[in-house]
Image: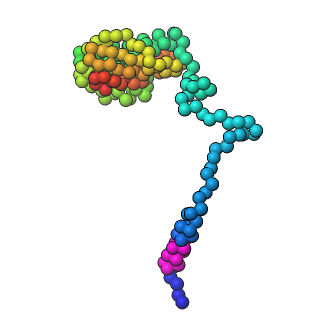
Amino acid sequence: MIVSRRSALLALTVGAGALITGCAGDPEPAQTAPTELEGRPIEPEPEDPTQEGGPVPASASEDDEQAAIAAARATMDVWVQGSTLDQMAWQEALQATLAPPAQQAYANRFGYKVADTEVTEDPAIIRASVGSAVLRVTTDVATYEVTVVKTGEEWKTSAVTPIAGGEE
């Protein structure tokens, strides 16, 4: 009897499927995470990193917080001039306040589309660490979250995100 390669492969596949199906009724024992390492208990990672024992970013100093506020304000003071400055002047002024990755991200932003004309409240820190901060800035049209990062010794804006109204 001559068996073709295709028939042999089909027979092997059917046989393997039957073997697997036959074993499907035997559940594998549940794998559990080890509870000890070298005789010491392993503590689970906290779900919230700010909980005790979790990694917490170093807090910003008061000088860093003031610099972060100034950086967010500088960006937003330019942002609200979008409809009053010509495009090139607005872009040049905006780019000077941005961190390098943000300079690329905002290079094609059109100032004339920004309806905001003035910052109405000083930036308020939502959270700040040694290297970054998120601030809330309110204008006459919208409220924004402005993210600033420390680049060397300077604080620069990395994102301007409208959270209520406004042009992103």
Horizontal arrangement in the rendering, residue 101 relative to residue 111 (left or right): right
Please name the residue shown 68% across and 40% down the image: 35
9 on left or right of 40: left
Q: x%, y% of residue 166?
A: 28, 22
Q: Is the stretch drawn in magenta largely helix, strand or loop? A: helix
The part of the chain drawn in magenta is 6-15
Is residue 131 visible in the rendered structure shown here? yes
Residue 118 coordinates in the image, percent (x, y): 28, 12
Which residue: 23% across, 15% down?
A: 84
Q: Is residue 78 above or below residue 49?
A: above
**Can residue 9 be seen by looking at this rendering?**
no
Furthest residue in direction bottom, as rendered:
1
Instruction: Estimate the x, y position of residue 53 in percent, counting from the top left.
Output: 62, 26
**Quadrant location of residue 114?**
top left
Q: Would residue 79 appear left or right of 97 to someone viewing this image?
A: left
Query: Residue 91: horizontal and vertical position, in percent?
Result: 32, 21
Q: Nearer the viewer, residue 70 or 17?
A: 17
Rendered view: 2 above or below 46: below
Screen quadrant of the C terminus: top left
